[in-house]
Amino acid sequence: MPTLPAETTRVLGIDPGSRVTGWGVVERREGQLRLIAHGTLRLGDGPVPARLAQIHRGVNSLLSEHEPSAFAIEEAFLGRNVRSMMRLAEARAVAILAAEFATCPIHEVAPALVKKSVTGHGRAGKDVVREAVMRLLDWEPDATPPAYDASDALAISLCVLLRLAAPTALRLPATGIGRASRGRKRWTAADLAKHQAWVSNPEEGS
Amino acid sequence: MPTLPAETTRVLGIDPGSRVTGWGVVERREGQLRLIAHGTLRLGDGPVPARLAQIHRGVNSLLSEHEPSAFAIEEAFLGRNVRSMMRLAEARAVAILAAEFATCPIHEVAPALVKKSVTGHGRAGKDVVREAVMRLLDWEPDATPPAYDASDALAISLCVLLRLAAPTALRLPATGIGRASRGRKRWTAADLAKHQAWVSNPEEGS
């Protein structure tokens, strides 16, 4: 499997959808988070089996290209619309299958935990999630922001990276770092350590 | 793809489940239905991704071994339990993916249509379905009956074979052939033709 430098964790996060599947690769080395790549797979209007094959092949290519040490995806959750929930379950399944075949460890995380981990809020909107993702990854101020599908996938990767670094329960209060530090600033290794300390023990130091 | 004799349609039916996945291969040649093989994939208690991989690999092997000209599976349907519904959607997706990769034409049929096609009843129980399957396939009287998961899969194959032979709408009345002819008898090509004529036009000849 991966031939990453020691002390490196690289996570491929997938935000599956039957029309568009977002993806994002983030790594953590020497306490520093780094964006590796992100994007979306656009699946078109073909029949469902063809789109499932596209997702599976697409994830497979991403695993080969980026050799992540972990694969991350949201847990199946209950939607309002049963049909779209089923389509989502199918998309998830074929993405997970690619990771399983690649013997890449699979992390399934609850959607609320993803949002909480990066923004401090379990019900944060897509724009707040994207903003938090861009801040955590030191997005260049004049670079194009990621598409929402991609920033959601990056948030899933970040959630797993932060959890792997601080595996205790993530009981984040509503006033998380995602809200406190709205102004753009570059995150240093010290900032990240502080964030992780806070993530692992939100009662203190916030 | 398949190198079947002319005028032969061979269908692999799959009844996916996250614990046991049933399968059945039936062919129709010169108006005669014939059982080719049937069985179950037992998936054990491993993690979900491992079980999905087993289903995908299992279906893949069946496609290679039996070279069906069509793949058949039930449409996703609403269950009482949302969690098991999601598990089922995942199992379906990875089975369908195998057929898509094998470029085997995929037929999705409604569960009620499967039951109706073989028994005349859209809500027939598993035992009635099995009995009808065994009759349609001239099961030897002293041979072991198929497991329910396998007979459900055979019913799916049979449904598609009957529909391909008689592609008009299957509007079967409640007193179908499955109920009328309870006694065991060997089905001849003439019986099958009669059944198909009845299937394609249930108002007449019943």
Image (cartoon, coloured by chain):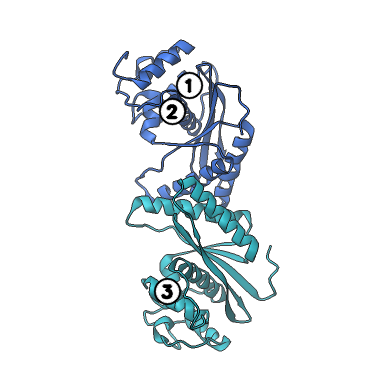
Chain colours: A blue, B cyan
Q: Which residue is disc 1 drawn over?
A: A134
Image mark 1: chain: A
Q: Position of residue B52 (x, y in %)?
A: 50, 50
Asked whether the viewer can see residue B171, the reply is: no
The alpha-carbon separation of the residues under discs 1 and 3 comes to: 57 Å
Image mark 2: chain: A
| Marks 2,3: beta carbons within 8 A | no
The kind of residue on which mark 2 rests is Cys
Relative vertical location of residue B65 with respect to residue A90 in this rendering, above or below? below
For numbered disc 2, what is the local secondary structure?
Answer: helix
In percent of the image, x 40 and y 68: which residue is there? Answer: B112
Please tell me whether mark 1 or mark 2 is closer to you in this view.
2
Q: Which mark is residue B129?
A: 3
Q: Position of residue B8 (x, y in %)?
A: 64, 74
Q: Which mark is residue A159?
A: 2
The kind of residue on which mark 1 rests is Met
Image mark 3: chain: B
